[in-house]
Image (tube, rainbow, N blue to C red):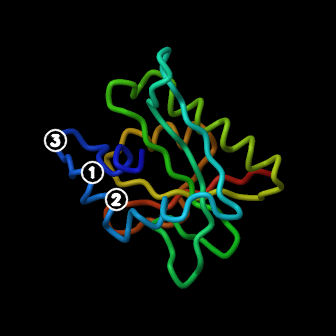
């Protein structure tokens, strides 16, 4: 689903092998499941994956796009295009935030490119922009 997350823009399709081998994207899935990693997968009625949301705590020495500080996991969501705008992403986001809260986490961060319709979802679920970068924003949600 990291490929779906990277390919959110219609017509901007990057090949699977290119996304998975690029260090900027691979850091979100390489060596899964490390201590502190958590995630959920949404499936259709046939059991095929249609979306996933997960978080991972990345080190200061190798920060992700949405890095805000030591100990703050970065959230990633990918939903297959045909399932976008059907509540899949919202359900995954809510489940992951509840899980993080239950694990005692205080905040979750994410990075979203400007123009991505998911910004509206993130804002409606309590994420706020904490840093406006070049073409993308870092958003944080306080969990407690």
Locate residue 21: give its quadrant.
bottom left
> Residue tagged by mark 1?
16
Q: Is residue 90 left or right of residue 65?
A: right
Residue matched to label 2: 20
Q: Which residue is mark 3?
A: 11
On screen, 79 above or below 102?
Answer: above
The percent coordinates of residue 7 (x first, y second) are 29, 47
Q: In the rendered image of this protein, does residue 129 appear above or below residue 1?
A: below
Q: Nearer the viewer, mark 3 or mark 2?
A: 2
* Residues at circles 2 and 1 in contact by the CB criterion of under 8 Å: yes
**Residue closest to the eye, 60 or 125:** 60
In space, the residues marked 2 and 1 are separated at their CA atoms by: 6 Å
Depth check: give the residue in front, 66 or 35: 35
Who comes first in sequence, dot 3 or dot 2? 3
- Left or right position of 80 against 13: right
The answer to whether residue 11 is left or right of residue 19 is: left
Residue 45 x, y percent position in the rendering: 50, 14
Using the numbered discs, state the Cα–Cα distance from disc 3 to disc 1 in whole angstroms: 14 Å
Label 3 sits on a secondary structure element that is loop
Categorize mark 3 by other alpha carbons within 10 Å: few (<14), some (14-19), many (20+).
Answer: few
Farthest residue toward the top?
45
Left or right position of 108 against 6: right
Q: Residues within 10 Å of mark 1 (few under 14, many from 20)?
A: some
Element assignment for label 1: helix
């Amino acid at each position: 689903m990291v490929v779906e997350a990277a390919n959110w823009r219609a017509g901007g399709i990057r090949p699977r092998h290119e996304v998975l081998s690029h260090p900027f994207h691979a850091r979100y899935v390489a060596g899964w499941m490390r201590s502190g990693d958590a995630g959920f997968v949404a499936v259709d009625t046939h059991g095929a994956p249609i979306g996933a949301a997960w978080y991972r705590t990345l080190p200061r020495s190798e920060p992700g796009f949405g890095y805000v500080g030591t100990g703050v996991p970065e959230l990633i969501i990918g939903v297959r295009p045909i399932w976008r705008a059907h509540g899949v992403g919202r359900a995954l986001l809510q489940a992951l935030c509840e899980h993080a809260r239950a694990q005692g986490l205080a905040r979750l961060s994410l990075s979203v490119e400007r123009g991505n319709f998911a910004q509206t979802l993130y804002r409606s679920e309590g994420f706020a922009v904490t840093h406006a970068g070049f073409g993308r924003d870092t958003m944080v949600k306080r969990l407690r």
